[in-house]
Amino acid sequence: MAEKGFQYRAALLLILVFTILLTFFGCLHTLGTTDKTISKTSTSLSTLDDEISDQIIVSANDYLELTTCGNLEEAPMAADAAAPVRRPIVELTEDEIFLMSCEVYCEAYTEPYDAQVGVAHVILARILSPYFPDNLYDVLYEDNQFPPMYSGVVDEAIANRSGDLVRDAVMDALYGANPVGNHLFFNMEAGVNLDDVSRYMRIGTTIFYTPTHFTDDGL
């Protein structure tokens, strides 16, 4: 009887140990599974965070591009539209632009800005007109047309670089600004007999006009 009691207790002990081992390994398995789940969740959160960050960066860049255009509604069109290339109406060298600027200075420095642009336009329009020489030098030095050119006044303006003071007006005219229409002549009010003028306009004290005997070439 004592031996059977011993065997019975030993069997119970083995069952208990076996049960404890099963429970232990079961816990380890559960912990491993939980760890993998946590790892996967962490990876998913990391990926989501990266996606959100990328989206924020894209949105910020888009916003900067739109606001740079100054008008959010026009931004797509502004991005696609190519800036037009500005071309001068007459090809001039830098020396010619400076000479012309000095002449405009002598004729209209004290006049409003539009009068300065108008004088420059008349000079350029004459180069393009079939009624006048086709180059700047001959237009400016044509007899009895631009007194400062042959009186020595322009030479003084050249020496003092006075032409730089009206260069902006000259460049505006060179690139198409025209406040005087088709007129190819100008003079101070005192030098114009309006009875000999078919049409004219006044800017400041400068009269831009077309003589009655002159055929309009459409410029």
Image: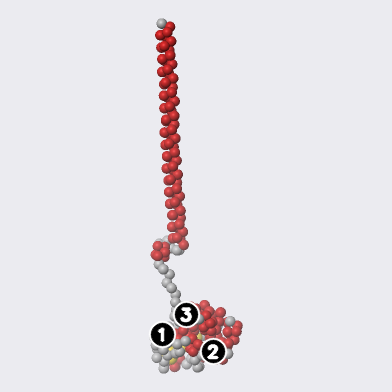
Say which label, 1 or 2, has the lower sequence index: 2
| Residue 136 in view in this figure | yes
Q: CA distance from mark 1 to mark 2?
A: 24 Å
Q: CA distance from mark 3 to mark 1?
A: 14 Å
- Against 63, residue 46 (above or below) is above
* Residue on which the image places disc 1: 219
- Against 22, residue 137 (above or below) is below
Neighbours of disc 3 within 10 Å: few (<14), some (14-19), many (20+): many
Disc 2 on helix, strand or loop? Answer: helix
- Against 177, residue 24 (above or below) is above
Tell whether label 2 touches label 3 (CB within 8 Å): no
Tell whether label 1 touches label 3 (CB within 8 Å): no
> Where residue 216 appears, x then y in whole percent?
40, 89
Say which amino acid is labelled 2.
Met
* Residue on which the image places disc 2: 149
Q: Which mark is drawn over residue 30? A: none
Say which label, 3 or 2, has the lower sequence index: 2
Q: Is residue 60 left or right of residue 102?
A: left
> Where residue 146 appears, x then y in whole percent?
51, 89
> Where residue 143 appears, x then y in whole percent?
50, 93
Q: Which mark is drawn over residue 174? A: 3
Say which amino acid is labelled 3.
Leu
Q: Quadrant of residue 63?
A: bottom left
Q: CA distance from mark 3 to mark 2?
A: 20 Å
Determine the residue positioned at 43% across, 36% down: 36
Tell whether label 2 touches label 1 (CB within 8 Å): no
Q: Quadrant of residue 58?
A: bottom left
